[in-house]
Image (cartoon, grey):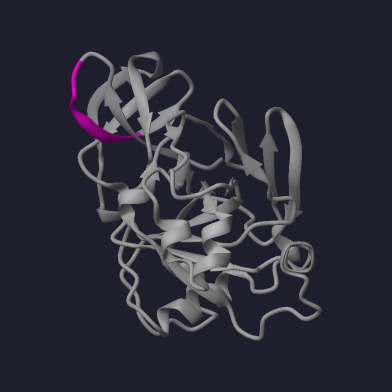
């Protein structure tokens, strides 16, 4: 059975910590789990904590156009990309479960994108495909929120993907997952709009880690967001969006 790692704040004080969530209790860790944090003697009721984004990465590396159906539906492309399309989101874009996504005034259309996230466990560079899985700490849910009109206007994606609140992550990290074939869903106002299995990815996760690590060093706690299935659509104020990944759980947010 996989372990669920969380980052949390106590409801009655501002202190933040990492922990292991099991049953109705949280065992506090003495540091980030990917840096060797160990369980302490402190056990807390889950009802007494507020979940935060479970990662504080040095960088968020995202993959565009990684599901065949998404490429065809959203970009009218006949052929998949020859190589992974990588881009970065700033760490300042991260929010946690139930935090509000803010619609920036510069954009007229903000979309959700449900994705599987990979958390790196060990510093790595120039990793082979065969060795890539050794560098995974765990798995989480990610919403790659995108200002779609700005993405098309700018021709590059930094502004469209980089606004504050544009990277909800959570609710926790699991350390075991059959990542090669899990269901990724985006549920908008209670209706399932996105549904795709990771087995339908154009580039699988070991290849992505290999490819990214050929470009940049990945640090413990870094986050890779692996692409979204078809079915993306805009959100408006008051809308809710759930990112559900089989074997992990659900990340829920709403738009302010």
The magenta stretch is 13-19
- Total residue callouts: 0
Q: Say if 22 sits above or below 151 in the image.
A: above
Which image quadrant for residue 192?
Answer: top right
Residue in front for this viewpoint, 206 or 77: 77
Residue 211 position, x and y percent, is: 50, 81
Is any atom of residue 144 visible in this view?
Answer: no
Residue at the spot x=62%, y=58% of the render? 179
Q: Say if 66 sits above or below 27 in the image.
A: below
Q: Is residue 14 left or right of residue 159?
A: left
Residue in front for this viewpoint, 209 or 251: 251
Q: Say if 73 sits above or below 209 in the image.
A: above
Q: Is residue 83 left or right of residue 48?
A: right
Residue 63 position, x and y percent, is: 55, 67
Which image quadrant for residue 24?
Answer: top left
**Residue 68 drawn in magenta:** no
Residue at the spot x=69%, y=52% of the render? 182
Is any atom of residue 64 visible in this view?
Answer: yes
User: Which quarter of the rendering shows the N terminus?
Assistant: top right
Q: Is residue 137 left or right of residue 225?
A: left
Residue 139 position, x and y percent, is: 50, 51
Residue at the spot x=68%, y=46% of the render? 233
Q: Say if 53 sits above or below 144 in the image.
A: above
Residue 236 position, x and y percent, is: 59, 34
């Amino acid at each position: 059975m996989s372990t669920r790692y969380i980052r949390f704040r106590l409801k009655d004080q501002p202190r933040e910590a990492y922990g292991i969530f099991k049953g109705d209790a949280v065992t506090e860790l003495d540091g980030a789990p990917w840096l060797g944090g160990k369980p302490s003697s402190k056990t807390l009721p889950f009802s007494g904590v507020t979940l935060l984004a479970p990662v504080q990465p040095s960088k968020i590396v995202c993959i565009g156009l990684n599901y065949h159906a998404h490429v065809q539906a959203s970009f009218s492309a006949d052929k998949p990309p020859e190589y992974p399309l990588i881009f970065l989101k700033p760490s300042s874009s991260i929010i946690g479960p139930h935090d509000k996504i803010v619609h920036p005034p510069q954009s007229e259309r903000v979309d959700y994108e449900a994705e599987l996230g990979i958390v790196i466990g060990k510093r790595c560079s120039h990793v082979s495909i065969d060795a890539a899985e050794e560098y995974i700490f765990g798995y989480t849910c990610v919403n790659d929120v995108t200002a779609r009109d700005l993405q098309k206007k700018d021709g590059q994606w930094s502004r469209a993907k980089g606004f504050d609140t544009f990277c909800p992550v959570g609710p926790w990290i699991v350390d075991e997952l059959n990542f090669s074939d899990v269901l990724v869903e985006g549920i908008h106002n209670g209706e399932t709009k996105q549904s795709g299995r990771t087995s339908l990815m154009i580039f699988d996760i070991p290849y992505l880690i290999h490819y990214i690590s050929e470009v940049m060093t990945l640090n413990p706690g870094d986050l890779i967001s692996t692409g979204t299935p078809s079915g993306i659509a805009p959100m408006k104020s008051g809308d809710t969006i759930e990112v559900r990944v089989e074997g992990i759980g659900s990340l829920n947010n709403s738009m302010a």
